Amino acid sequence: MAHFKDRDETLLHQLYEWQNKDLDDIPVTELSNLQYILEHLPIGVGYTLKSKLGEFECIDDYFYDRQEHYFEATEEDYKSKIGECYINDDKTVVMKVVGIRDDYDDKYYESDHHVDNFLYEKYEKYNDGSWHQQDYIWLQETAYGKHSDEKYKRWCLTKQTDMNINSENMFMLGKDGNFYIDTSCGGDYEIYRPFSKATFELIREEAIKNDGEYTVD
């Protein structure tokens, strides 16, 4: 273990925790640390990863397949989350799922629709402990901004509603029912766990009191 003494203590803890676990039992949030270790083995040391998904001689291949399966959520899965609230482990960001993108009447629905484009509200805690709305809400800007697109107005359920679009900061629903954001696009996941609905509403009230409702310039 001395070879890792300069690594973060979290990694050292995980190395001990992994000793009696199957590969598939390692949380998806820890795979990037496993990837780091395997990518820095001495020359001449090889490995084979054996899992329920098959055998892999490259951590990247296993990582990709594991993520693809872990985040395979259906529209029904997202619908079941409407009204539910979540918070990150740092307790600095809260999120509530408020609806889904339901443009079934769009003739391009099958080709353009993404089941993960759900609707949400998100609030952030500043260093002084106060809560605030997002500085930029993509859905509001798209629906009412300078180059507005009328079709998006139907999903602006409130002035704080945003849409989960396919980007580096998108939320992904995991098999465990929690939401994740891949903060680095490299598997460094930030997890959002269930949170009190009543407390979320208090935070929302404070954020709107501090900032006013979101407006598009």
Image: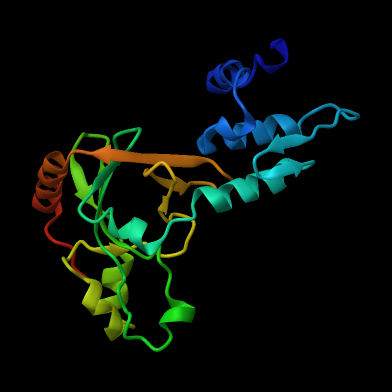
Residue in the picture at 65% in, 14% down: 5
Image vertical order of residue 23 relative to residue 85, above or below: above
Q: Residue at x 34, y 61 (%)?
A: 76
Q: In x, y percent, where is residue 126?
A: 26, 40
Residue 47 at x, y = what percent? 81, 32
Of all residues, the one furthest to the right in this rendering is 44
Q: Is residue 133 left or right of residue 192?
A: left
- Image quadrant holding the C terminus, namely bottom left
Q: Quadrant of residue 24?
A: top right
Q: Is residue 162 above or below residue 106?
A: above
Residue 42 visible (yes or no): yes
Q: Position of residue 196 (x, y in %)?
A: 18, 38
Where is residue 92, by image quadrant? top left
Is residue 98 left or right of 25 when viewed as pictured? left
Q: Is residue 138 left or right of residue 82?
A: right
Above or below, 111 against 130 in this view is below
**Residue at left 41%, top 81%?**
109
Closer-to-camera residue (22/124): 22
* Res 145 seen here: no
Between residues 7 and 106, which one lies in front from this camera angle?
Answer: 106
